[in-house]
Amino acid sequence: MKQELEVFFDYACPYCLRAHEYLTELMPQYPDVSVVWRPCEAHPRPDRYGPHSDLCIQGYFFVRENGADVLAYHDRMYRAALKDRIDIESIDVLTDSVRDLVDADAFRLALQQGTYQKALAESNRLAFERSGVWVVPAYRMEDRKIDSVENVGVSKEQLRRFLDQAKG
């Protein structure tokens, strides 16, 4: 039976990008672990720190619900927020960045109408109120957890050791 690894992350977090790269590299070694993505906002509005990732996260819920490639979407959003530094607070700019992954018109409309705002709020509550996440990235598997150190993150070796425990 597969174990579930919950990954709490924010597209605007450079430590989450690095952790995502580590996880992508490591996961083929752990076929009995499935990843459950738990996006959450490290700095939700009206926090003055930005850019705000709320639209990116709402887009994730659209992608997931519509069967698009979630890993490709993750890569796009991390690149948009942290490498290309496009305006991730603009619905039009985000839509242009994913138009080859999803139905762009439906994506834009979902963001404009706030279709996934409730999912975003629930995801934030899950992370910060029910799962004890203090800083992202954070990982939960059964009764075990690994949390980032603020402004440091999680090393690849820490993540590997955490996943090794899933092997028994």
Image: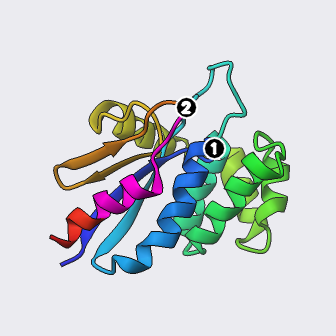
Q: CA distance from mark 2 to mark 1?
A: 9 Å
Specify the segment rendered in magenta: 152-163
Give how far across and how far down residue 67 sits, in percent.
Answer: 54, 75
Question: Was residue 155 drawn as part of the magenta stretch in this picture?
Answer: yes
Which amino acid, by three-letter code, is at mark 2?
Asn
Give how far across and how far down residue 153 sits, in percent.
Answer: 49, 41
Residue position marked by numbered label 1 in the rendering: 14
Residue position marked by numbered label 2 in the rendering: 151
Q: Quadrant of the N terminus?
A: bottom left
**Considering depth in this image, is 55 or 138 the residue closer to the camera?**
138
Q: Residues within 10 Å of mark 1 (few under 14, many from 20)?
A: some
Which amino acid, by three-letter code, is at mark 1?
Pro
Q: Is residue 109 above or below residue 13?
A: below
**Considering depth in this image, is 45 or 111 the residue closer to the camera?**
45
Give how far across and how far down residue 13 sits, in percent.
Answer: 61, 41
Q: State the residue at coordinates (79%, 68%).
A: 99
Whether residue 44 sits left or right of residue 143 in the image: it is right
Q: State the residue at coordinates (45%, 46%).
A: 154
Q: State the residue at coordinates (50%, 47%).
A: 9
Question: Was residue 144 drawn as part of the magenta stretch in this picture?
Answer: no
Mark toward the viewer: 2 or 1 = 2
